[in-house]
């Protein structure tokens, strides 16, 4: 479903919600895919049965006003564990550019439990797509690092593109201590 966008797939209806199909640029080194984005918030609860239908335009036309894929973020180069004293160094990659600087990333965007953000630098000087991050553990407890999804572009630390698309996914990782 939705893999061949050349079919001109129309809206997907799940319960009372309408989803629009769109081509997505997913993280580097993966194939492009299609996704469905809800036009409204969730209209059902976990476990509830809802009717599903998809409408394909009968005239063979395609969906002209496809939405752009929501921006995503992900961690790479994560260590398997930490020793309680040396910094944990890893990278964050974004699928789209956000207007931000390293103080914003360190102080308002990333959340760290049992550690302290020490450094954030761009991997490529003129790009916000890849960042190298350093976190100093507070001790031997597991360190939890979270990049939360954006709920409102007006919030402090919100990651939004210039056209108002918000960071779509929450990423969280636990780095076990010794």
Image: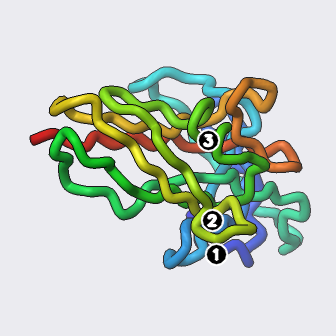
Q: Are marks 2 and 1 in contact (CB under 8 Å)?
A: yes
Q: Are marks 3 and 2 in contact (CB under 8 Å)?
A: no
The residue at 20%/55% (across/down) is 80
Q: Quadrant of residue 160?
A: top right
Label 1 vs label 3, nearer the camera: 3
Q: Which residue is mark 2?
A: 34
Q: Earlier in the sequence, mark 2 or mark 1?
A: 1
Horizontal side of residue 161 vs 157, given as left or right: right
Mark count: 3
Alpha-carbon distance for marks 3 and 2? 29 Å
Label 3 vs label 2, nearer the camera: 3
Alpha-carbon distance for marks 1 and 3? 37 Å
* Residues packed near mark 2 inside 10 Å, few (<14), some (14 to 19) or many (20 plus): some
The residue at 74%/24% (across/down) is 155
Q: Which residue is mark 3?
A: 105
* Residues packed near mark 1 inside 10 Å, few (<14), some (14 to 19) or many (20 plus): few
Q: Which residue is mark 1?
A: 4
Alpha-carbon distance for marks 2 and 1? 8 Å
Q: Earlier in the sequence, mark 1 or mark 3?
A: 1
Label 2 vs label 1, nearer the camera: 2
Q: Earlier in the sequence, mark 3 or mark 2?
A: 2
Q: Position of residue 127 (x, y in %)?
A: 71, 65
Q: In terms of secondary structure, where does tag 1 sit?
A: loop
């Amino acid at each position: 479903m939705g893999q061949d966008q050349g079919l001109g797939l129309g809206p997907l209806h799940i319960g009372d919600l309408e989803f629009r199909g769109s081509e997505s640029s997913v993280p580097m080194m993966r194939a492009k895919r299609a996704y469905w984005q809800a036009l409204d918030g969730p209209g059902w609860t976990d476990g509830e049965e809802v009717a599903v239908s998809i409408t394909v335009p009968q005239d063979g036309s395609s969906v002209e006003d496809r939405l752009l894929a929501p921006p995503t973020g992900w961690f790479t180069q994560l260590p398997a564990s930490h020793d309680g004293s040396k910094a944990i160094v890893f990278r964050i990659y974004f699928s789209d550019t956000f207007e931000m600087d390293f103080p914003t990333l360190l102080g308002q965007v990333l959340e760290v439990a049992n550690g302290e953000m020490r450094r954030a630098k761009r991997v490529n000087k003129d790009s916000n797509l890849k960042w190298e991050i350093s976190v100093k553990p507070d001790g031997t407890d597991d360190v939890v690092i979270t990049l939360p999804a954006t709920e409102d572009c007006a919030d402090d630390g919100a990651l939004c593109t210039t056209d108002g698309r918000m960071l779509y996914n929450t990423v969280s990782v636990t780095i076990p201590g010794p």
